[in-house]
Amino acid sequence: MLRTFQLSPNGWRSWLLLQRGYNPIMRRTQDWFELARFGLFIHWGPYARAGWEASWPLVGGVSTLPFGQDIPAQTYHANAEGWQPDPAAPEKWIAAAAAAGMRYAVLTTRHHDGYAMWPSQYGDHGVGRTAPGVDIVGAFTDACRRHGLKVGLYYSLPDWHHPAYPPFTDAMRPYVFGEYPEPTPEGLAEYQAYLRSQITELLTNYGRIDIIWFDGAWERSPEMWDADGLESLIRKLQPEILINDRLPGHGDYATPEQFVPPEPPVEPWETCLTMNMSWGFNPSDDHYKSSTVLLHTLCEVASRGGNLLLNIGPQGDGNIPEPQADRLAQIKRWMDRHEEAIIGTTPGLKPWQFPGPTTLKGETLYCHLLMQPVAPVSVRGVPVRHVQNVRVLGQDHPLPFETRIPVLDELNDVDGLGELVIDVPEVMRDPVCTVIVVEFDCDPAGFEPEAS
Ligand code: GLC
């Protein structure tokens, strides 16, 4: 009997990815994540009230956070007493994120300092004690849903405050990576139960959670975290959830930190990036990247098939610090016109084909000009006979363009690859990044030339 099989659109996509070296069976990322491209990271905790970097000051700082403070552990923890985080704050962040075109958000529910931003029944360090009645995780998940953003919860595996972990004390300074006092066997069992209980609360009490974003795995072995056990618990509680790669051995996607990977990882990925050099609200750090640099990073990340998780560190009162709010506003301005070239796109052409990042949506190619051209620009190695339209994104009238094709192809009437030469008049250029849209009637990246 002749057996035929049919593939759904998603099946075709998986098949295509397989051809390009991905194994869809190993992949758990949902389609939404792979096309989301832009999300907001929020580091918020009692440290914001004092204007300190998140958690690291209590262990004496870390070289990668050069503006971080050095605060004795007791002083650091005492700062949490009486903090009343404003439950209205998440609405402001998420409204700004949605306006800037972001599709998801990740909140620090508990950073390394152990302070829980929801009223946890387990452990007494968090809003449950210092601000009874306040639930920032609840306010955050509600705000995300109101604005149609996917919900991510950051959760630190280490807890430098928990009695069984054991807690970090000043006697343990300096902090050395890979060297950390081990808990007693009873302490370890207690700590593992605490992690499971808190994670169960987070993944049970707030509806569907799209991402759990772990951090700090370097302090213990996968066995000590019970990474396998945590993974099955998480998948049981939230079958659709994505886990980042910081739960050792179990990640659904990679999380390069503070840089755009030169070779994009084969698996789905997300670069997390600060606007200045701190995760938390740190007024002593004014080493900010400009909104142009942040947007260029977004274009680069999108063109390589990744997502950008851009961080804000709200102030103690919940407001977004002015330099960060300004940058979000600038990003919104550009995204209002150019979002189509970022969100929902796949990687475009190879680097030699255009002097800048490119993205693709079906048969539409987006060429991102990160520099002001000093001459007409070329898009090379594309099916020039299949061009329907060339324009600047956000502007209606077609741009004139010239084509160059190999002479022999022309003589033999080959439907082949050639070069588009496009002159973008100065008045049509965007000061941040001009996007040239080229519409084809075929997939320009997968086109196979044919003699006609
Ligand atoms: C690092 C830091 C932490 C920060 C995280 C974000 O792992 O320890 O402070 O939250 O990066 O990726």
Image: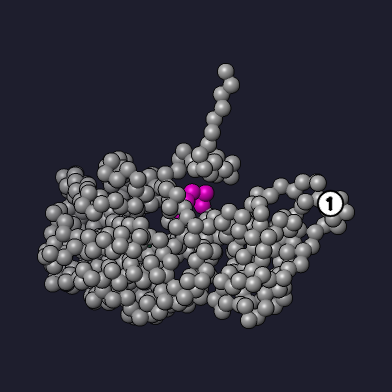
Residue situated in front as seen by the camera: 420 or 196 = 420
Q: Is mark 1 within 8 Å of ligand 1?
A: no
The quarter of the rendered structure image containing the N terminus is top right
430 displayed left or right of 200: right
Give the labeled residue for mark 1.
413
Residue at x-position 57% and y-position 43%: 16
Residue at x-position 35% and y-position 57%: 150
Q: Secondary structure at mark 1?
A: loop
Q: Residue 118 location in percent, x, y?
A: 19, 60
* Camera sees residue 77: yes
Q: Residue 95 location in percent, x, y?
A: 34, 69
320 displayed left or right of 162: right
Amino acid type shown at disc 1: Asp
Q: Main secondary structure of the magenta part?
A: loop
Say if the magenta span includes residue 110.
Answer: no
* Extent of the magenta region: 265-269
Residue at x-position 56% and y-position 24%: 3
- Please say if 314 is above or below 136: below
- Please say if 272 is above or below 451: below
Residue situated in front as seen by the camera: 144 or 120 = 144
Q: Residue furthest right?
A: 411
Q: Residues within 10 Å of mark 1 (few under 14, many from 20)?
A: few
Q: Residue 69 location in percent, x, y?
A: 30, 74
49 displayed left or right of 15: left
- Please say if 91 is above or below 443: below
Residue situated in front as seen by the camera: 164 or 290 = 290
Say if the magenta span includes residue 268.
Answer: yes
151 displayed left or right of 341: left
- Please say if 82 is above or below 11: below
* Camera sees residue 172: no
Residue at x-position 56% and y-position 79%: 431
